[in-house]
Image (cartoon, rainbow, N blue to C red):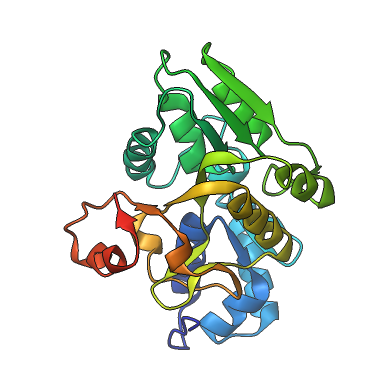
Amino acid sequence: MKEIIAGGMLKKERHAYIVNQLNLHNKVLSSDLSMQLMVSEDTVRRDLIELAESGKILKVHGGALSKSFHFPYKEIEIYAQESKKEIARKAISLITEGMIVLTGGGTTVIEMARLIPDDLEATIFTISPIVALELSEKKLLTVVLIGGTLNKNAKVNMGSKTIGDLSEIGVDLCLLGVNGIDLKEGITDSDWEVLQVKKAMIRASARIAVMCIGEKLNSVKKMKVCSLNKIDYLITDLPPTDSKVKLYAQQTQVL
């Protein structure tokens, strides 16, 4: 279920498509873009170089990163920031006094960390140093940063130590960001290392809440994290009555 678009696009249109995919998924692979755009990987590589030189993206080996994902703590524009704040507010409504919570990284989780009430007492485990720093501003929170090898692109800890540490904890709620989500294919990702950490996070958690902007619904990546029926809550910026999320409500609770 890979999205294929018509060939023969102008360079300007290709650039707009690439930026949009980065806004939605934070990371893109050159090989995927080559297939989606129906152009050679050399063409994609040149497009990425031009976009990077213009300051719109960050080119990395094999693809590119969104600037807002890579530097979320700096004063730069965050894609769909108000939508992510709405998701964050809904996510916070699931956190009750004394709860033990686990989070990943990403701009939506950072928005949540900033919006958590100052009078909420809870314990939050996270694999993201940036999220941990944001949470540390809340005096009543106990913040535990799970160790591992820092992924310099995603700015989260990964690897065998991270997975091992996750296997030794049990939490009430996991707030999980996703790269792809689809009614049939479930939760998917394009990075093997990220996939393994997300699976470990799910195993460590009594309940799972997926946080996802509406634009990302019905998108599929190469590798499966879990089926949709493993998810307890789907949190989007859309109202539960929206036609786009109604079908998801048949398999999980939509907020």
- Rendered position, 32 above or below 174: below
Query: Would you identify the image quadrant in which residue 218 lies?
Result: bottom left
Camera-side residue: 14 or 181? 181
Q: What residue sits 46% from the left and 78% below the top?
A: 10
Q: Seen in the image, is 233 located left or right of residue 245? A: right
Q: Residue furthest left?
A: 241
Left/right placement of residue 227 relative to residue 242 reads right
Q: Position of residue 85 (x, y in %)?
A: 36, 37
Image coordinates for residue 191, horizontal then vertical, percent: 68, 64
Decide which of 105, 66 is in the foreground and name it: 105
The quadrant where residue 125 appears: top right
Across and down, in percent, residue 59 comes to 68, 57
**Image spot of residue 103 (x, y percent):** 56, 40
Please determine whether, in this image, residue 88 is positioned above or below residue 36. Answer: above
- The residue lying at 62 percent from left, 28 percent from top is 132
Residue 47 lies, with reference to residue 125, above or below; the image says below
**In the picture provided, is 200 more to the left or to the right than 123?**
right
Between 186 and 41, the one lying in front of the other is 186
Do we see residue 67 in this rendering?
Answer: no
One can see residue 112 in this view = yes
Q: Quadrant of residue 254?
A: bottom left
